[in-house]
Image (cartoon, rainbow, N blue to C red):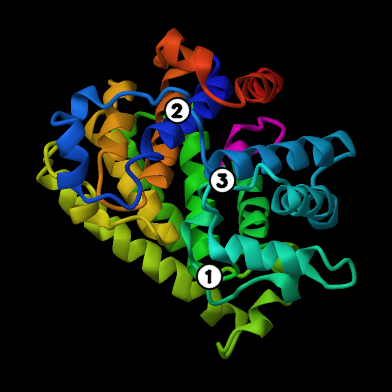
Amino acid sequence: MGAATGALLGLAIGDALGHPTEFEEIEHVAAYCPDWRRLPLPEPALVTDDTQMTLALGRGLRTALERGPLTPLRLERPVREEFVDWWRSPANNRAPGATCLRSCWRLSKAERRWQEASDVGSKGCGANMRVAPLGLVRDLTIGQLAGPAQLQSALTHGHPTALAASELTAYTVRLLADGTPPAELPARLRQHAHANRSRYDAFWLGDLAAHAQDHSPEEFIARGWADCLFVLDRLDAALARPSVETDPCEITGEGWIAEEAFATALLCFLLLPDDPVAAVRRAAYSSGDSDSIACLTGAFAGARHGEAAWPEEWAGRIEYRDELLALGALWD
């Protein structure tokens, strides 16, 4: 089936589809493409920082797993190096997020602990736009995803909602790759959020919560899960009255923040669970952070349907194709 290859190609395809529409109002997009079902993949099919950072995480994760079972230090070191390399790269010219840039600059100071580099006030979607690889690595059980997913977010985005949304995103990718029916996802995700709403994982996060203003680590992390449960309420309401013709950003949020990027991407997938191409087009044809929303939608659809989900012509010319395929083959 190739769930890993499908998810990695899908996120890059969604990213490239949404790149030209990001920051654009629907009316402006409609001026050159009246029908969202016909939104073309650009030529050349260039991606944004979303795919670049996903690949950085993927490379760091691959290095960490080659060194042994995943631990906080074993994951942090290579991922930190990859994020800093991305920050320094001349290819980092795709309108990267301010939090990623600031935090990676701080991470570049070798003497600085990562908890001191993290921005605990930012819950931007840079936290979870890149997390899909963790859900694709079968060396990790589904119960082992939470800590690494939160840590990779916290290297840049340390807000508790960024942590929780990253965990939910990785968890969704894994559920889909494992064959969970899409209709079961909302209830599974809500159950997961409730079960973890007061669990602060000090093994993976260290003293990150001490850098915020909450009274306790449990209060800190509970804020994040409360935000995620709220946006899951909005998702449930949208699915109760589905409208594939409505701009998804009007329903579950514009996606600039982590929990909204997750919910709006998942909405696009769940509206069109058996049509991955239409799902990423619907996500990209939106008024908010279109590339990040479509990136995550593509990851969900690809994890569900495998690499056969994507037209060969699209997959054949997506930027970074060779590296995406290499990581996909490793994890498939």
In this rendering, is residue 115 above or below 94? below
Q: CA distance from mark 3 to mark 1?
A: 22 Å
Whether residue 46 appears in magenta in the rendering, the answer is no
Q: Amino acid at mark 3?
A: Asp
Answer yes or no: is residue 103 visible.
yes
Residue at 61 percent across and 37 percent down: it is 133
The part of the chain drawn in magenta is 132-141
Residue wearing tag 1: 160
Q: Amino acid at mark 2?
A: Ile
Residue holding disc 2 = 13
Q: Of the residues shown, which amino acid type is indicated by label 1?
A: Pro
Q: Position of residue 88 (x, y in %)?
A: 75, 52
Crowding at dot 2, Cα within 10 Å, few <14 / some 14-19 / many 20+, comes out as: many
- The residue that appears at 81% across and 63% down in the rendered structure is 108
Upstream in sequence: badge 2 or badge 1: 2
For this rendering, which residue is in front, 230 or 302? 302
> For residue 231, what is the image quadrant?
bottom left
